Amino acid sequence: MLQHTFVHLPGVGLKTEFSLWEKGIHSWDLFCDGPGCAPAPFGKRKYEALSKRLEECREKLCALDPQYFAANLAPQFLWRLFANFRQCTAYLDIETTGLGGPQDHITTVALYDGRQVFHYIYGDNLDCLIRDLSKYKILVTYNGTCFDLPFIRNYFRTAVDHVHIDLRYLLAGLGYRGGLKGCEKRLGLDRNELNGVDGWFAVLLWQEYRRTGSAKALETLLAYNIADTVNLENLMVQAFNMKVNETPFRETKIPMPCPPSIAFKPDAALIDDLRRRYCI
């Protein structure tokens, strides 16, 4: 989809882009067909400047540099980067002890790159997270703009300046609201044993683990955290395909991914016990 995009060019908005598409100028290559064929509303000088910029775009795409495009795209168009940069994209979700007060900290993190799942635990390997994030160029989250990324930046006292696609806003623009779990249900994802487990429940699972040393509590928390993360890929692909349906380029839709195997399994008895104890 990126090679069909023109709204990252200076002076080109959505209306102009649609006008180009209607004229059959569907790609960077068709725009740059040569001198003397400048499409309206561009004069020769503007056309030549934009053609030169598109040459630079080709170089940045070959160099796998999504930052270049993100710097010139409005946030609502960042989804267009996904297919071209999927190989350097990771999905991220964190669990914490609270909403970010002075005493709150990250408990677990799940990171998924479409091939392998990585997990991080406070007091164990959490300090490896920033090193591992540096391997990727795009992060996909749900509500990471308001929660996950600020929490990580504050906790580690470091910049996390990846290109960021926040599914909360992308899905809201498509009519899907109600939090991550609500979006998942409406888009056909079932949590099975984890149905009804939410962020507050994740706090209780961590407290249970710290209080009792229960391996089942930690494993259930990790199963929940990882489910949050791997489901982001499914939602990202669905959102990408729905956005593509709004354009003339439906052939650029992406097949739905196969979910990875998750090593951690939730403990149904523990979940039921916590529900009884905390009247959830």
Image: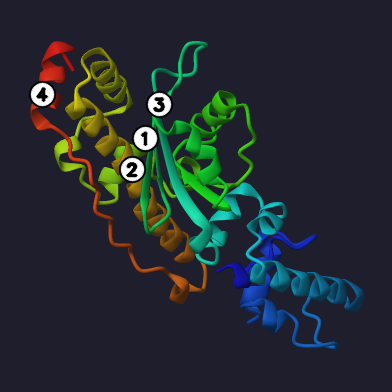
Foreground label between 4 and 2: 4
The earlier-in-sequence mark between 3 and 4 is: 3
Q: Residue 92 sits in which quadrant?
A: top left
Whether pointer 3 and pointer 4 mark residues with C-beta atoms closer than 8 Å, the reply is no
For disc 3, the neighbor class at 10 Å (few under 14, some 14 to 19, many from 20) is few
Mark sitting on residue 122: 3
Q: Position of residue 276 (x, y in %)?
A: 11, 15
Say which residue label 2 marks: 183
Is residue 39 or residue 148 the one in the foreground? 148
Residue at mark 1 to residue at mark 4: CA–CA distance:
23 Å
Say which residue label 4 marks: 272
- Is 192 rendered above or below residue 267? below
Rendered residue at 80%/87% (across/down): 37
Mark sitting on residue 71: none
The answer to whether residue 41 is seen in the rendering is: no
The earlier-in-sequence mark between 4 and 2 is: 2
Is residue 165 or residue 33 the one in the foreground? 165
Residue at mark 1 to residue at mark 3: CA–CA distance:
25 Å
Q: Position of residue 144 (x, y in %)?
A: 50, 36
